[in-house]
Amino acid sequence: MQYEGVLTKMQTENGSPIQYYLVFENDFLSVNQLLDKKMSISFVKYQCLNCSLDKKIYRQGYCYDCFYEVPQAADWVIKPELSTAHLDKEERDLAYEKRVQLQPHIVYLANSSNVKVGVTRKTQVPTRWIDQGAHEAIEIVEVPNRYLAGITEVALKDHVADKTNWRTMLKNEIKDENLVEWRQKLKQFIPSEALEYYIENNTETHLEFPVLHYPTKLKSLNLDKTPDYSGVLKGIKAQYLIFEDNTVFNVRGNEGYVVRLTIDQ
């Protein structure tokens, strides 16, 4: 079987285990069904997710020009504390910024390689945790806009990590943590503006990834350096495909790349 299309992050559905899907313009592919099968990935061309031109991808699936123009790649996306829509101030596109920033946001703790703090829109729970490869997570506060979530994250990351070690996450070198205790310990550091939104009573969410075999050493597949690759798929975690020879492929990190997938039956 052969499929071709531009890569975007895999869609997910929480379950036991999590279900993963690759969505192309003309194909909808259940990635879980490809486990233990040989997959070939061939780079075809670039296709910017905004202008659709065959221009080298710069970041987040966009060419250089589009990355510095589209609201989806503005600074506040990565740094929520820079959000200004609640002040009616535009960065790139006020209508878009209001639509995204002025909705309920969650500040959470997730454990993927270590306990980390993060921010996501409420509608993205638990998708955000799945995309980060977290095997457990818990909400800390639910605030009405992205700015409040951002300043809460900034305050808490002085006391807990805000990054995932992707290598540790993919090797599954993890330990369980009591996130309820972590949340209670961090409560004292929540800014006064967000403290009323603290969630007193909730439990951890546990996530199960479809992995048959975790790698011991990691080789990251770079399509610019290796445009053709073949391997047996052994797992899917976060937005990574894990292959039998310890090669890992970050689907989200290759958004905007048009690929041809060949699956041996």
Image (spheres, rainbow, N blue to C red):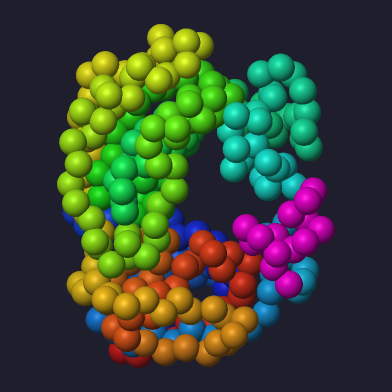
**Residue 202's spot in the image, x, y percent?**
23, 24
Q: Quadrant of residue 22?
A: bottom left
Membership of 67 in magenta stretch: yes
Q: Is residue 122 above or below residue 137?
A: above
Q: Vertically, is 83 above or below 40? A: above
Residue drawn at 68 percent across, 47 percent down: 73
Residue 203 falls in image quadrant: top left
Residue 251: x %, y % from top left? 48, 67
Please provide the residue range marked out in magenta. Answer: 56-69
Image quadrant containing the N terminus: bottom left
Residue that appears at 57% across and 80% down: 223
Q: Residue at x 29, y 39 (%)?
A: 137
Quadrant of image for the C terminus:
bottom left
Q: Does residue 140 appear anywhere in the picture?
A: yes
Picture coordinates of residue 117 (x, y %)? 40, 37
**In the image: residue 56, left or right of residue 43:** right
As for residue 104 lying within the magenta part, the answer is: no
For this rendering, which residue is in front, 205 or 8?
205
Residue 134: percent from left, percent from top: 31, 50
Toward the viewer: 137 or 258? 137
